[in-house]
Image: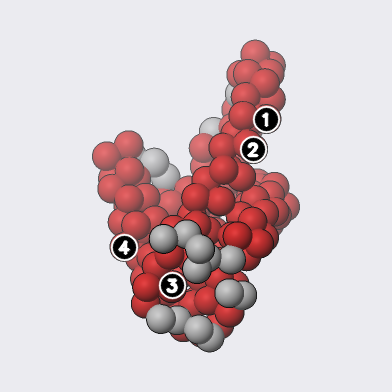
Amino acid sequence: MFTALNFWAILVSGALFWVLGGIWYAAVFSKPWQEALGFNQLDATGKARLQKEFPKALLAHFVCGLIISFVMAKVVSAMGATSVLDGMASGFWMWLAFAFTLQLISMMFEKRPTQVFLVNNGFYLLAFALIGGIVAVWR
C-alpha cells in the first residue's frame, strides 16, 4: 500500500506547500488578505494572541502539507499520471473537488469576504498543481 510511494517526494512537496504558503500569505498577498480578515484592526491584545498562536499555525500548515502530498501521491499513482502535466491536472481536479468546494461552502456560510476566498484558492490551486506535478514524476 505504501511501498510504491516516494516518501522523499512527499516530504519535499510538503515542505514546498509550507514555503509557498509563507511566500503567498506573508509576501505576495499579505496586505489584502490581512485587511480582508480584519487583522489590521486588532488591538495589542489581539495581535499578541495571534503571535502566540502563530507557531502552532505554522506546524499545522506543514503537517497539512504532508497529508495533502501523501494523498496526492496516492491519487496520482492510482490515476497512472507519470508526467508533470498529468500530475498537475490531477492536482487541479483534487483542488476543484475538495479545496475549492469546501472553501466556497465556508465562505457562503461564514460570510467571509470574497477576497479571502480568492487569495486562499489561488494558493491551493497553485500548491495542488505543483504537488501533483512533483509526485507524478518523482517516483
Q: CA distance from mark 3 to mark 1?
A: 31 Å
| In contact (CB < 8 Å): disc 4 and disc 3 | no
Residue type indicated by callout 2: Leu
Dot 2 and dot 1 residues touching (CB under 8 Å): yes
Eye-nearest disc, 3 or 1: 3
Residues packed near mark 4 inside 10 Å, few (<14), some (14 to 19) or many (20 plus)? few
Q: Which type of secondary structure does the marked residue at label 1 adopt?
A: helix
Residue 92: image x %, image y %?
Answer: 42, 71
14 relative position to 1: left or right: right
Q: Tell how many labels.
A: 4
Provide the residue designation for mark 3: 76
Q: Nearer the viewer, mark 4 or mark 3?
A: 3
| Label 2 to label 1: alpha-carbon separation | 5 Å
Q: Bin the neighbour count of mark 1 within 10 Å (Cα to Cα): few under 14, some 14-19, many 20 and up.
A: few
Task: Name the residue beneath numbered marker 1.
Answer: 55
Residue 110 figure quarter: top left
Q: What label sits on residue 97 in the rendered view?
A: 4
For the point 66% across and 62% down, the residue is 8
Q: Is residue 134 above or below residue 63?
A: below
Left or right for 88, reference 24:
left
Label 2: how many residues lie within 10 Å, few (<14), some (14-19) or many (20+)?
some
**Label whose residue precedes the other's in the sequence (3 or 1):** 1
Q: CA distance from mark 4 to mark 2?
A: 25 Å
